Image (spheres, helix red, strand yellow):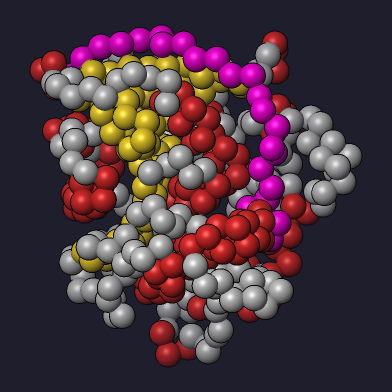
Amino acid sequence: MSRADINYDEAAVANYELPDPLRCLDGRLVENAEEWRQLRRPEVLQLFAEHVYGVTPPIPIATTSNVVEEGTILGGRARRRQVRLRFGKGRGALEAELLLYLPRVRSPAPVFIGLNFHGNQTVRADPEIRMPQGWVRGSRDDGIFDHRATEASRGIKTARWQVERVVNAGYGVATVHNGDFDPDFDDGYVNGVHPLFPDYSPAALGGAIDPKHRWGTIGAWAWGLSRCLDYLRTDNDIDAERVCVMGHSRLGKTALWAGAQDERFALVISNNSGCGGAALSRRNYGETVRSINDIFPHWFCDRFREYNGREGKLPVDQHLLVSLSAPRPVYLASAEQDRWADPKGEFLAARHAGPVYHLFTLQGLKEDETPPIGAATASGHIGYHQRPGGHDVTAFDWEQWIDFANLHLGAP
């Protein structure tokens, strides 16, 4: 399927029926928060694991952390900390480098954490930031040559991270290159985090895992976010109960899946995440299940491909993924020109997750219709906006996320 075959006509969206977030597979109707937690939530989580993202290995891994560099920025108003995380032992161990900025005047500080695409050095034009040593997705325009980061890549994504704005608001910022956990190409899952689990097989897990359910790259990235959270919860300068996970595009899909699996994340943010993220698959608008599997076959488990052109047969849709964050606050952000990510489909996923939040006597998304471009709706526990512009992260996005975190987690 080429992009020429993609539907951008709202009138061409066929009628569809979404799975009821409160209806269990055996037909029982969930009537309260306890039944959601005990009955429906576990089965929804399992359905996403088996049909979309793959099953994350429930196997602990030896982990160590080592602070390799510290410094100050912004005239001493913020601290920079670089931490090497090591998973496993011996020559087969995996290393990831966490870049952390913390406001100097507040401790412990709440933190926004998210993965980045091209390396930590892209976050700020700072010669002290360590460069990724492995495979990096990107082009010469990004300062990436033969899939290796160069000095030309320093600071190219400063606008996306808004470190000064976030630190001035009293929050920390943490990020890791996504390729540290799994390079973003179809390699048959032979590198990144996957070799750490050589015994991840049906036999090792009591015969419960079908090979079609083995985790893909988005699952590996989500696992990495949780391992970063493990470290953040040991750092006395960080408020471990107020860590917000965020992500953009494919990393927005990752943030939603990480937040669904790991309830230690206090708030979940997805930006322009589209198909397999916040947008309803059944709408077949913009990017579809078929197109995403054709272009990025390594992101999801093999079984997800069975729903190419058969989205109505999926036992889940993305409003259920959003609902897995309940009762924690969740924010979905869209962009007017990012039709590929289906802004309306993202809004509808937010709205249809509301019944689960109501079980907790919490307000979901108050609006029934998409709010005006450039206006945020964030008074309930589900926030949403659609800003002008295209597929990116902007200062406007960060302003809304900070306000949303202040509202629901308390201002720093």
Q: Is residue 391 visible?
A: no
Residue lying farthest left?
75
Q: Is residue 30 visible?
A: yes
- Taking the spot 64% from the left edge, 71% from the top edge, the residue there is 24
- Examine the structure image and report whether residue 57 is included in the region drawn in magenta: yes
Is residue 320 placed above or below 282 in the rendered structure?
above
Is residue 110 placed above or below 337 in the rendered structure?
above
Q: Position of residue 210 (x, y in %)?
A: 82, 52
- Taking the spot 61% from the left edge, 50% from the top edge, the residue there is 299
- Examine the structure image and report whether residue 319 is included in the region drawn in magenta: no
- Taking the spot 27% from the left edge, 45% from the top edge, the residue there is 409
Q: What span is colored magenta in the figure?
A: 50-73
Q: Quadrant of the N terminus?
A: bottom right
Image quadrant of residue 167?
top left
Is residue 75 placed above or below 143 in the rendered structure?
above
Image quadrant of residue 390?
bottom left
- Taking the spot 62% from the left edge, 62% from the top edge, the residue there is 39
Q: Position of residue 63 (x, y in %)?
A: 59, 19
Left of 93 or right of it: where is 368? left
Image quadrant of residue 292?
bottom right
Left of 48 or right of it: where is 391? left
In this rendering, the count of numbered labels is 0
Q: Quadrant of the C terminus?
A: top left
Front in this rendered view, residue 56 or 1? 56
Is residue 152 placed above or below 10 in the rendered structure?
above
Q: Position of residue 59 (x, y in %)?
A: 70, 32
Q: Position of residue 214 (x, y in %)?
A: 73, 47
